[in-house]
Amino acid sequence: MPYDYGYTYKDVGIAQSYAQIYANTLQWLRPGDLIRVDVNGDGIVDGSDRVASTGYQRSSPTTNFGLNIQMAWKGFDVSMLFQGTAGRKDYWITNFNTLNIPISRYASTVEHVNNPWTYNNRNALWPRLDLSSSNQAGSEFWLDNLSYIRMKNLMVGYTLPKQWTTRFFVDNLRIYYSTENLFTLTKFRGLDPEKTDRGDMYPLVNSHSFGITIGF
């Protein structure tokens, strides 16, 4: 097996009713809990029902890639840097979406409070809150694909014609705009697919800058 491979419970999603719970292997659940799959069919859902996967790693991607594009036309220039990874999956479990209350439960926005399952919020992002929840044990529900493509840098510039700048004793004058981390394409539900620390919830910074380069 590869280093840090996936070893995960299968599940059928969040239980919406007791009828749905009773239709599966007995697991002492309540509506709002995750229903796990009895993979080996022994009538008990425990650690032996976890499934190993060799198709990805949890701690690091199997592939890193980048693409640098540069173009110029009639004084205009554009450069773009794309960067990304593939072959990594991990559990979307952070200090903000923990289901245990009240000790380790805290939120930064109203949405974090409203996301857990309730009878009035059946399309919730998370299972129900509980004093001691087992719903965050590693299962497919929390497993996210951390592959991504990110525009790391974009720069657009324009160099003024020399017949304009020489009047002011300037050999060249270039005006440019630059931005970092313009967008990220990913299926990850969290803030940044590169982050690994469940307590690091600072979002990726998107910066913009304008500048002028003058040559004499």
Image (tube, rainbow, N blue to C red):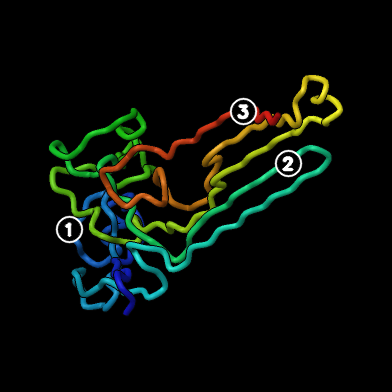
Query: Is label 1 or label 2 in front?
Result: 2
Residue 113: assigned label = none
**Cβ–Cβ below 8 Å for labels 3 and 2?**
no
Q: Is residue 82 left or right of residue 63?
A: right
Residue beneath disc 2:
77
Q: Secondary structure at mark 3?
A: strand
- For badge 3, the amino acid type reads Gly
The mark that comes first in sequence, 3 or 1, is 1
Q: Residues within 10 Å of mark 1 (few under 14, many from 20)?
A: few
Quadrant holding the N terminus: bottom left
Residue that lies at the very extreme toward the top in this rendered image: 168
Residue beneath disc 3:
211
Residue lying at 40% horizontally and 43% vertically, measured from the top left: 191
- Which image quarter: residue 49? bottom left
- Residue 12: percent from the left, percent from the top? 36, 61
Residue beneath disc 1:
28
Q: Is residue 194 visible?
A: yes
Residue lying at 43% horizontally and 51% vertically, measured from the top left: 188
- For badge 1, the amino acid type reads Trp
- For badge 2, the amino acid type reads Asp
The mark that comes first in sequence, 3 or 2, is 2
Q: Secondary structure at mark 1?
A: loop
- Separation of disc 3 and disc 2 at Cα? 14 Å
Location of residue 39 with respect to 118 vertically, above or below: below
- Residue 133: percent from the left, percent from the top? 18, 49
Q: Is residue 145 left or right of residue 59?
A: right
Q: Residues within 10 Å of mark 3 (few under 14, many from 20)?
A: few
